[in-house]
Amino acid sequence: MKEIQINEIENIRIGNAQNLEAGTGCTVIICERGAVTGLDVRGGGPASRESEITKPLAAAQFVNAVLLSGGSAFGLDAAGGVMRYLEKKDVGFDVGVTKVPLVCESCLFDLTVGDKDVRPDAAMGEQACRNAETNCPEQGCVGAGTGASVGKFLGMDRAMKSGLGFYAVQAGELKVGAVVAVNACGDIFDYDTRRIIAGMMNESGTGFADSEATLCRMAEQQTQMQMTSRLMQNTTIGAVITNARFDKAQMNKIASMAHNGYARTIGPVHTTMDGDSIYAMSVGDVEADMDLVGTLAASVMGRAVNRAAQNASDGYGLISGSTFRRRTGS
C-alpha cells in the first residue's frame, strides 16, 4: 500500500473557495457521473442539506457533489451555486424538462472567526466548482477549513487554528482517500503516537491543557460548565472517497467505519456541541471487500485530520498547533 495524492482518485474533482478576510469558505467534491453516497452523522448539532437521499431507502442512487462549508446553517446557501454550475453542464437527475443536480452539504461553525456576517453563498459555491476544474486543491486554512479551529471547551481564548486536510492510499487497483475540515471542540492527536498536536492551551499558554483531562477535573471539582453559548459551535465534516463499487447501504456502513478515524485523532469527539459528519462516496468500479475499504477509510480519515492540523497557519488571533509546539516544545 502506498500514499497517493487525493486527485489521483478518478472521476472526482475537488475545489476550494474562500474569503480569507472574513475567515470562511467551502470545499466541493464533484462527481459528474454520479457517486453512490452514504452518510453517518455522530455529532449532536449538524447543519446539513439533502441528507435524506443518502439513505438506502431513498430513490436517488447517486449524488453529483458533496459540499463541505463554513458559515454554520447560513452556509447551506452555497449548495445553490454548485447546483447552478452543474445545471449549466447538463449534470443531474433527469426529470424530463431538465436535470436536477443532487448536491449534499454539511456546514461547520466558524462565525466566531473573522466576520460573522459573511458566509459561503451561491457565488462562493459556484467559484469552488470552477476552481475544481484544475483539480489541484490545497490543504490548510483554505476552503471549508478557512475558519476552522480546535480545542474550544473553555472558549476561543485558549483555542488553536485548524484547517482542511487530505490523505489517500492505493493498494493494487483500490484507492481510498479522505477530505476533512477539522473544527473540533476537542483536541487533535497524532494518529501514530497519540500525542496532542493541536488543541486547548493551558492557562499560562505554555503547553496543552488536554481537554478530556480538564473535563474530568471539572467533574471532580463539581465545576458547572457553561456550555449553552457554545452549542453547535464546532463540527468536523469530511468525506471518504473510493474507486471501489458498492451500493448505498454498504457506503453508509463505510461512512460509519470512517468515524473510527475521528475517534483515534479527536478527543473528545461526537459531543452534543459537535455536528460531526462523514460522507462516503463510491466513484469507481473496482471490486473490493467492504470491511477492507471501511478499515482503510478510518485510517485515511484519521491521517487527514492530522494533515488539517499540521497544514494550518496562524490567523484570526489563533495560533496553529505547529507554531505552538515550536515555541513551547510541547
Image (cartoon, rainbow, N blue to C red):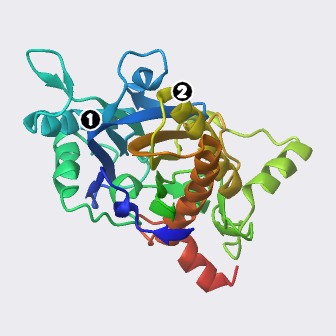
Residue 211 visible within the image: yes
Q: Is residue 185 in view? A: no
Q: Residue at x 18, y 56 (%)?
A: 133
Locate residue 60 relative to residue 98 in the image: left or right. Answer: right
* In this rendering, the label closer to the viewer, 2 or 1: 2
Front-most of residues 30 and 203:
30
Kind of residue at disc 2: Ala
Question: At x 51% / y 70%, what residue is drawn?
Answer: 3
Number of the label disc, if any, that sits on residue 249: 2
Provide the residue designation for mark 1. Answer: 79
**Identity, as a three-letter code, of the amino acid under mark 1:** Ala
* Residue 208: quarter of image: bottom right
Numbered disc total: 2
| Above or below, 317 relative to 126 | below
Gap in angstroms between the C-alphas marked 2 and 1: 24 Å
**Number of the label disc, if any, that sits on residue 128:** none
